[in-house]
Amino acid sequence: MNNSSTGYYFSEEHDLFRQTFRDFLEKEVKPNVNQWEKDGFLPREIYHKFGEMGFFGMTLPEAYGGMDGDVWYNVIFDEELARMNSGGFSASIGAHPLLALTHLSAEGTEEQKQKYLVPGILGEKIGCLAITEPGGGSDVQGITTSAIRDGDHYIVNGSKTFITNGVLSDFLIVVVKTDPSAKAKGISLLIIDRESKGLSATMLDKLGWRASDTGEIAFDDVRVPVENLLGGEGQGFLYIMQHFVTERLSLGSGGVAAASYALEVTLKYMNEREAFGRKINKFQVLRHRVAQMASEIEMNRAFVYSLYRRYNDGDYPVKEASMCKLLGTQLADKVITECLQMFGGYGFMEDYPLARMFRDARLGQIGGGTSEIMCEIISKMMIEGQEYKEPVIQH
């Protein structure tokens, strides 16, 4: 299934990059995915290889080793990762540039960029973004991890959970309360080095995304230098909100890509599998299911691409990005379940691709803001006239 639209959304340069990236993944990733799923984490060498090829800096500034490319490189990145059939691999390798490096590029000082962003783009240092806490997920304003100023340090106490790259990353961008008495205006971001005394992490055992090191992190009187404050004190909530649109677009795009790849794999199987003396792709009931799924995938893909174009042109489509995340992740769940059924008993076997797809797809409606949260944002904007404008950052 060709999801390129050369001449409209994608240029010839984009298509050449897609082929280069796909070839790289086929050679360096696909043969190793099953082992990484068993290990529960990615080896550092794959980050080094991504960095050497420039894949972590596609949309980041050239001054720090990036390509200064447009958002369509991120779209291609998401779509091609989905073809590896490992939600954990896609999560870990994607969270590093999309979450950690994006914040560093946008809010970091020159010194912070040289120390973390440059080696991050090269794949020499791995980062993570730590927001979620054991006591709450989507309520960012309600976090309780504290960072109290003590001279030229902050003293950090609290915990985070469900953090992608939370165990093996070299540095963590941690959302903290620098003013526990305030809500949104008391939130800040700190860069905390992995070897900091008082920081500990535990690997979580998950249903899916098994190639990703998802961690629960504890901070016990961790001393963090004041120069590790990322951006302005009390502006962390605005920084997070500023990047939510791109995260939701990425999750929606990834969901559509996963559904598309599942159908591609299923069509190949249907052309090989015989029942009652003929290929199963000759049975009308299955053919019509394929037609229905393909139609929904293409409709969702067109919506995703239109939103990326708007964002690339400077728009800030909060409502539509929330819809994109809601429907894209639901589509992945729906299509992959249907495709597993097409495989019959083999769909339930780990030796076949749909079993892992089925497990991995389920997290789409939970991570990055649940489907219920997406619906609440959409309904607030439609029913109550709530507006979510792009935050104005005070420098």
Image (spheres, helix red, strand yellow):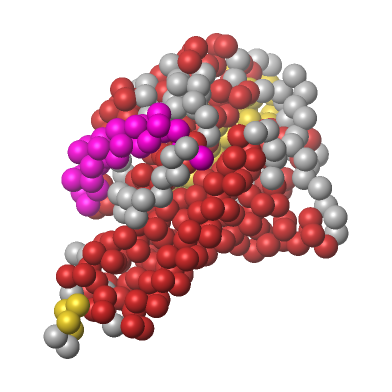
In the picture, which quadrant includes the C terminus?
top right
Image vertical order of residue 113 relative to residue 95, above or below: above
Image vertical order of residue 118 relative to residue 93, above or below: above
Quarter of the figure with residue 333: bottom left
Q: Main secondary structure of the magenta part?
A: helix
Residue 236 horizontal side relative to residue 204, left or right: right
- Residue at 68% x, 33% y is 314
Q: Which residues are magenta?
A: 8-35
Task: State the image coordinates of residue 366 (x, y, percent, origin top left).
Answer: 54, 59
In the picture, which quadrant includes the N terminus?
bottom left
- Residue at 59% x, 59% y is 326
Q: Choose between 357 and 282: the one closer to the eye.
A: 282
Residue 388 horizontal side relative to residue 29, left or right: right
Whether residue 281 is visible here, answered yes or no, is yes
Residue 76 horizontal side relative to residue 324, left or right: left
**193 in magenta:** no
Quarter of the figure with residue 29: top left
Query: Farthest bottom residue?
Result: 276
**22 in magenta:** yes
Image vertical order of residue 28 relative to residue 118, above or below: below
Q: Choose between 198 and 259: the one closer to the eye.
A: 259
Task: State the image coordinates of residue 18 (x, y, percent, origin top left).
Answer: 35, 37
Residue 321 horizontal side relative to residue 178, left or right: left
Task: State the image coordinates of residue 21 (x, y, percent, origin top left).
Answer: 32, 35
Whether residue 158 is visible here, answered yes or no, is no
Task: State the image coordinates of residue 254 (x, y, percent, origin top left).
Answer: 46, 50
